[in-house]
Amino acid sequence: MEVAVGKPEVPCLFIFGDSLSDSGNNNNLSTDFKVNYSPYGVDFPDGPTGRFTNGRNAVDFITQLLGFDHFIPPYANYADCDIEEGVNYASGYAGIRYETGKHLGENVSFKRQLEHHKVIISEITKKVGGRRAEIAKRRLRKCLYYVNTGSNDYINNYFLPQHYYTSLDYTPEEFAELLVQEYYTHIKALHELGARKFILNGLNLLGCMPHEIATHGSRDTACVDTENDQVMMFNDKLRAMVDQLNEECSYSKFIYVNTAVISSSHPLLHSNGVREINKCCEVGSKGLCTPDVEPCPERNLHPFFDAIHPSEVVNRFVAASSYNSPSKSYTYPFDISHLVQS
């Protein structure tokens, strides 16, 4: 995949989500889940930044494909950055539900990320001045809003009955519906703040993560099928929500990225092409890399960097397939390249 850095195709990009997109927002939080240490960032130009992978994450690649000559800064550092070109609010181990991941310490839930976005909108409006406030609003309507959340509502909530009661209170179908209803509420709130072009990412096949296989599978388990079935319930409802939003919100565009299908079609994860399914680094009980231990040398042969997060090679593939989709099963109703032109 060649990245086209130059004049951006959109004026700004705002990013919401979890550790798949976090670029440093967890670094100063009181949590065990921060990764501003080696071997994370071993293939990133700036070294360990708080990204949960060896190099760039998927939205980093998308940022470059859109033509930005820099990565979108995390909200934690926004005071020193050009916020008019976008902000990254994503927080590792955060979810749609407020309580998700809180047994691990602090994180910034989706609702709280929206509150941070309100702060940024206020800052942008003040920056351009009162008379130009309408110009700022028009600019925000041309931006892209990238959302990738929901994974932790399963792996750090529903799949952990020792910490959360959700699996006792709700059937898998009920929980998926509950999550999508709350997701819908947050997206409508974001729309009210001026967002018009949305990228909504479905969940990966969580049951195929090394950490989930180790904790909920058996020795011969390739994937935890019951977990994947529940993920697909959520994904199907999210895609239906995209249809609903496209009907309800005039002058707005919503697309669904089928991350589960994209990721599983990567040669490293395809059943006929797996060379090394295991993680690349030595991990502790929580699935993160052990600090300062040398990772595997051939990182491009590993779909996972730690026991939870994809390696850069998979992130590159997901980004390229989302931006310029070779298959209608990857993005719906069209891909990111068509979204920016709409």
Image (spheres, helix red, strand yellow):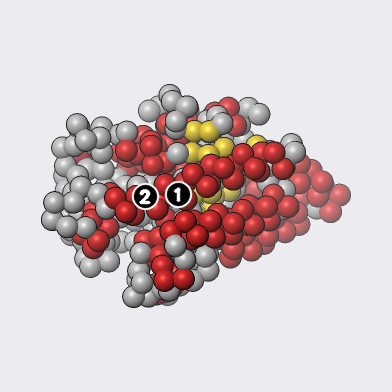
Above or below for 104 versus 91:
below
Residue 311 higher or lower than 158, as above or below: above
The residue lying at 59 percent from left, 45 percent from top is 241
Q: Which residue is mark 2?
A: 229
Residue drawn at (20%, 54%), measured in percent from left and top?
281
CB of mark 2 within 8 Å of CB of mark 1? yes
Task: Classify residue 222 as left or right of residue 260.
Answer: left
Quadrant for the C terminus in the image: top right
Which quadrant of the figure contains the N terminus?
Answer: top left
Helix, strand, or loop for circle 2?
Answer: helix
Q: Position of residue 273 (x, y in %)?
A: 20, 32
**Which of these two is toward me, 198 or 9?**
198
Picture residue at 82% right of the left edge, 46% below the top: 134
Horizontal side of 255 relative to 44 (left or right) equals right
Give the residue pinned by disc 1. 233
121 and 337: which one is in front? Answer: 337
Kindly state the secondary structure of the residue where label 1 is placed: helix
